[in-house]
Amino acid sequence: MKKNFYSTFLLLLLPTILISQVEEVSPPDFIKTITFKSNTTQGQLPILKLGEPLNLEFDALTGDEEDFYYVIEHFNFDWTPSTLVKSEYLKGLDNQRILTYENSFNTYQIYSHYDLRIPNIQTRGLLKSGNYMISIYDDYDELMFSRKFMIYEDLVNVGAKVKRSRDVKVIAEKQSVDIVISTNSINFNNPLETIKTLIVQNNNLNTTISDLKPQYTLGNELIYRYDTESAFYGGNEYLFFENKNVRASNVGVQYIELKELYHNYLYANISRKDRPYTYNPDINGNFQITVIDRTDVDIEADYTMIHFSLLHEELKNKDLHIYGNFNAYAIEDYTKMEYNPESGRYECMLRLKQGFYNYKHVAIDKTTGVLDEGAISGDFWQTENNYKVLVYYRDLGARFDRLIGYGDTSSVNISN
């Protein structure tokens, strides 16, 4: 009897234990160049207005024309599963095969390019705003990768402005984001509890600031002007290279060799942490596939081996990685740089599709696992960064978090 009681208790407790924040799953080595092309040509975090189409593309480097299937799930503000059933947020069916794909043409690297567009015949649209995740499975029902995206309703105006940090201790290193939410005469119940905010720097979900409360109201406006809570490290402008022509050196490429693929050797970078800030326009960590002499970049852009190097003394307690949105800012084994004592450089080689890429060198503490973006690049208040502000609302008694507003700003005109 006691055993049955404990078994029943654990079964009742199990759903509570299993409910946790969901994380993106990185793809295996043979899947590359995962790109949302919904409302931008750059690979970046997709934030779509309700009703806009979703377009996810990726390459499978096996060239075997495998079958892949997609599943779409809805999540709360904190990325725990929402209580909505699928028919409430999705019109039609998911768990369908991706039907549109093409094989590469006239490339050294053989691959198949997959193109998923929603709405389509089976999945006719997404009905609710909020947080979503799309997961891609293979024919054996094994998860290949997953990516987060957001859908918003344009119900409130979201104003954002970037200022230098008000904390004098980090005034030279940090940027603070002030927010003003105009409710447009909508009566929100208890906004201190029902409205939640999310601030995203450079499309990187790993460094977001979330759930700030409005400090006060002014008429129909909610005001957020924090001294420290809304501050980000400014970082530095991203490094970049472009290899739209694989047979000739281009921006950031020192020289080229043709082996099994084209190998592009980039100019060696140096530490910028203790150097003066220099403005150098970038695309804030994103990437864009470009080819100079082809018409269809999706299947005619080739893959190249990119050789990165950093002139730096060996760090005994830190690992260095290549960091950027080319892999959704994930820290992977293949992004780790190895120290070469003969050249006195950290070196790394990545297989990337032709294009324009932003990247930087970051350090991971070997003991704590903490990532430091400014360890090599430095942190400067002048750095041009992009900030996105998302506003969520769950009314009293509601079953899910609606994404009711979206604002976008840049620190290019940062002020004190």
Image (cartoon, rainbow, N blue to C red):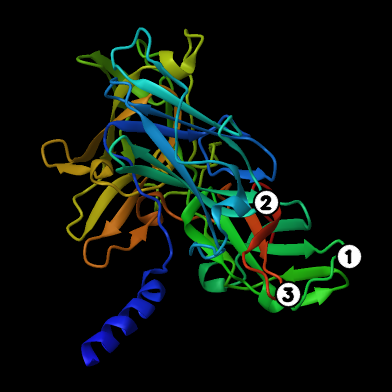
**Residue matched to label 2:** 152
Residue 191: which numbered mark, if any? 3
Q: Can residue 17 be seen in the rendering of this structure? A: yes
Along the polypeptide, which appears first: circle 3 or circle 1? Answer: 1
Q: Can residue 387 be seen in the rendering of this structure? A: no
List the single residue furthest toward the left.
342
Spatial CA distance of label 2 from label 3 is 18 Å
- Pick whichever, 78 or 228, lies toward us: 78
Residue drawn at (82%, 64%) of the image: 183
Residue 185: which numbered mark, if any? 1
Q: Amino acid at mark 3?
A: Pro
- Pick whichever, 204 or 38, lies toward us: 38
- Pick whichever, 167 or 260, lies toward us: 260
Residue 157: x, y in percent? 79, 56
| 280 displayed left or right of 163 | left
Spatial CA distance of label 2 from label 1 is 19 Å
Graded by Cα atoms within 10 Å as few (under 14), some (14 to 19) or many (20 or more), the crowding at tag 2 reads many
Residue 159: x, y in percent? 75, 57
Across the whole image, how many numbered discs are drawn on residues? 3
Along the polypeptide, which appears first: circle 2 or circle 3? Answer: 2
Residue 299: x, y in percent? 42, 16
Spatial CA distance of label 3 from label 1 is 13 Å
Along the polypeptide, which appears first: circle 2 or circle 1? Answer: 2
**Residue 23 occupies which quadrant of the picture?**
bottom left
